[in-house]
Image (cartoon, grey):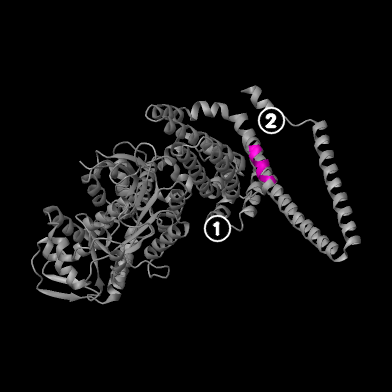
């Protein structure tokens, strides 16, 4: 291998350069003199014909000049890519931050005209000043800029491998596979170069091909031994059934190996944080369904990342899918699903595509229903609903992974709540980035477990005798958790076309008064004797108090986002979902009838009603405990001096603990954090 690498990478001798240079100059001079003699003789014999031929020669020379300029531009682009690659490799080797910043600036200039990379370039500009070493900065650039380009290049390699394998296996002509392999490889190399910004001309293509083959020979022997052994072994096994099929697999693997070499040569950044494509992986995806069964058929082998409340996960478990959870809180996750496989990460910190890559291995779909109702000490809506989802969408598009986004009915960039605006930003990012995606926007989701708005409804329904209401005529459309889960399953099975954006709501809206009465009846509470209509300002004042308590750790269902959402209504249009082929959503009465209330549901509703008084009592007790210690400092210290403490140390201890108590108020949680609920990659096994 070392001998082959030395021969392949050896530079031509100076004598050979002089030989080919002089030969080319001599041929050009001879052709020029012959053309000159021909045209002058023709002008002397027939001026009109001679001048016409002269005009044709001039036009031909002009075309040749344009072609030469384009070839020079192509060589310049290839040289620019080579220079970037070498500069990045040197910056990584020497850990030179200034050199790395120069590389990032040149990359930004190179891709300034790429609309598809606009999002990544903007985020790179925002985060680049925060990086303080070359490795981290170039890894960030690789995640933001190279990830979508790598995905596009990988698709070209897979297409070429599939074409070569198919022709080899199915066309019986002796030289057909040779011709197809040659043309497919040359076209693949040129398209890979175009993807990374090194579009080449005719001569540039030959130079590029030579560079790829040199790289392949110089570095590919070990890779062939390690990376291709599975593909070649698969071809050997398949050849037992059909010699042509076995040759097809082998030729497809060789084409994939050439494609990997082309990616490594044309890529302006060396592989650092990103993973170099494997030949075995390329071949398995390229030939899926061609030799030995279709991949990703519904119900067979789909693997998904799932981020949701427990109802959806339970539905998929019932269908026979294997689910692995992605969550933030180990304690909450284990409590809700102790038998589930879990991985843990904070969604708010997964803000670049590279953060998602370790969790996207062997995954076919991602279903995201994670969310937070309102900003708080542990919740950041911009990060959770916008930045993290944009990074997820980019990573999914780059790796051909389907993304099902559970959004909310009524989201808009100019919505009245930050919840709706941040959800809209995430949806827009998914649509802008592209890839296979489905955006489902459910109305008010009704399930056994209550969060946010549904928790508020249950709390209102639990008030005895008198029904307090504000904004009683607000229109609301609902959906049951089972209907939502079935819609997600339909998207994954392929029953709904990718790119679908649809509201998931029942046909008829209900007023808040009707919805509260239905919830009260469902919980089994006694009918109300009277209705107390509260003014809107009273609800807003209550919501502000709940927001304050939220900063102390209690996530009340009366926070301003829930109240404002109920005030503006929860409405959607089911027409788009019907047009996409989705099943109709059950009505409110049908949903409640299919979901009988349990004793614990009634108890939880009453506890939600009592929780504000419990929190207030605990807070007052906490505050007065500190205040009494400070006001009666001598009396409190006397309890310690009788035990032998010096007076000054006893007083210092009492004052210090009183101050600490006042700084650490009790924290009560009204529900699990946004990433604690089951969030899962699920492997879809055949339903049993």
Q: Which residue is mark 2?
A: 9
Find residue 370 and name its label: none
Q: Residue at x 60, y 46 (%)?
A: 190
Image quarter hosting the C terminus: top left
Q: Which residue is mark 1?
A: 118
Q: Position of residue 282 (x, y in %)?
A: 46, 39
The front one of 220 and 462 is 220
- The secondary structure that dominates the magenta segment is helix
- Depth check, mark 2 against mark 1: the one in front is 2
Query: How crowded is the residue under tag 1: few (<14 C-alpha within 10 Å), some, or many (20+)?
Result: some
Q: Position of residue 312 (x, y in %)?
A: 26, 51
Of marks 2 and 1, which one's residue comes earlier in the chain?
2
Q: Judge whether residue 541 is colored magenta.
A: no
Classify mark 1: helix, strand or loop. Answer: helix
Residue 558 falls left or right of residue 234: left
The span picked out in magenta is 203-211
Q: Position of residue 448 (x, y in %)?
A: 19, 55
Query: Can residue 272 be seen at all in this image of the molecule?
Result: no
């Amino acid at each position: 291998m070392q001998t082959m690498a030395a021969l392949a990478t050896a530079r031509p001798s100076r004598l050979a350069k002089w030989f080919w240079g002089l030969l080319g100059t001599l041929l050009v001079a001879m052709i020029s003199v012959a053309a000159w003699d021909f045209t002058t003789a023709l002008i002397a014999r027939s001026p009109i014909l001679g001048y016409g031929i002269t005009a044709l020669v001039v036009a031909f020379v002009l075309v040749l000049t344009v072609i030469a300029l384009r070839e020079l531009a192509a060589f310049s682009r290839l040289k620019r890519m080579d220079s970037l690659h070498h500069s990045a490799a040197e910056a990584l080797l020497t850990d030179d931050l200034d050199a790395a910043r120069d590389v990032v600036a040149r990359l930004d200039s190179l891709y300034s005209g790429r609309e598809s990379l606009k999002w990544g370039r903007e985020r790179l500009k925002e985060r680049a000043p925060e990086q303080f070493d070359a490795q981290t900065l170039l890894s960030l650039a690789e995640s933001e800029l190279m990830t979508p380009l790598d995905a596009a290049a990988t698709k070209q390699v897979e297409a070429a491998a599939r074409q070569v394998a198919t022709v080899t296996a199915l066309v019986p002509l002796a030289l057909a596979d040779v011709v197809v392999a040659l043309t497919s490889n040359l076209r693949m190399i040129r398209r890979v170069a175009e993807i990374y910004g090194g579009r080449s001309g005719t001569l540039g293509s030959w130079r590029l091909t030579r560079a790829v083959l040199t790289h392949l020979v110089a570095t590919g022997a070990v890779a062939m031994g390690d990376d291709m052994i599975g593909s070649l072994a698969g071809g050997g096994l398949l050849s037992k059934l059909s010699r042509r099929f076995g040759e097809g697999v082998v030729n497809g693997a060789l084409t994939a190996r050439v494609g990997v070499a082309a990616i490594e040569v044309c890529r302006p950044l060396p592989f650092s944080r990103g993973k170099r494509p494997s030949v075995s992986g390329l071949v398995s995806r390229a030939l899926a369904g061609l030799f030995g069964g279709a991949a990703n058929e519904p119900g067979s082998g789909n693997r998904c990342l799932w981020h949701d409340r427990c109802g959806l996960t339970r539905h998929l478990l019932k269908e026979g899918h294997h689910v692995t959870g992605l969550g933030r809180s180990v304690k909450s996750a284990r409590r809700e699903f102790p038998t589930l496989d879990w991985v843990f990460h904070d969604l708010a910190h997964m803000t670049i595509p590279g953060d998602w890559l370790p969790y996207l291995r062997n995954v076919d779909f991602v279903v995201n229903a994670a969310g937070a109702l309102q900003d708080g000490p542990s919740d950041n809506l911009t990060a959770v609903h916008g930045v993290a989802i944009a990074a997820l969408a980019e990573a999914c598009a780059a790796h051909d992974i389907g993304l099902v986004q559970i959004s909310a009915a009524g989201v808009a960039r100019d919505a009245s709540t930050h919840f709706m605006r941040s959800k809209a930003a995430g949806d827009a990012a998914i649509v802008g980035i592209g890839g296979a995606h489905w955006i489902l926007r459910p109305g008010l989701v009704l399930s056994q477990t209550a969060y946010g708005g549904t928790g508020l409804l249950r709390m209102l329904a639990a008030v005895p005798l008198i029904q307090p209401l504000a904004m009683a005529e607000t229109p609301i459309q609902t959906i049951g958790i089972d209907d939502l889960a079935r819609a997600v399953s339909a998207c994954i099975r392929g029953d709904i076309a990718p790119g679908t954006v649809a509201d998931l709501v029942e046909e008829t809206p209900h007023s808040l008064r009707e919805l509260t009465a239905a919830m009260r009846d469902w919980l089994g509470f006694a009918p109300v004797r009277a209705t107390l209509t509260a003014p809107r300002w009273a609800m807003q004042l209550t919501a502000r108090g709940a927001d304050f308590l939220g900063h102390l750790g209690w996530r009340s269902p009366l926070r301003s986002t829930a109240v404002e959402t109920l005030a503006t209504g929860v409405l959607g249009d089911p027409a788009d979902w019907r047009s996409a082929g989705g099943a109709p959503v059950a009505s409110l009465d049908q949903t409640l009838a299919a979901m009988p209330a349990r004793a614990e549901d009634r108890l939880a509703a009453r506890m939600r009603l009592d929780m504000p008084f419990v929190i207030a009592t605990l807070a007052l007790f906490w505050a007065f405990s500190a205040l009494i210690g400070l006001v009666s400092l001598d009396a409190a210290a006397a309890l310690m001096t009788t035990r032998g403490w010096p007076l000054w140390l006893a007083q210092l201890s009492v004052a210090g603990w009183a101050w600490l108590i006042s700084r650490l108020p009790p924290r009560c949680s009204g529900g699990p954090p946004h990433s604690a609920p089951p969030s899962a990659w699920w492997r879809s096994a055949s339903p049993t």
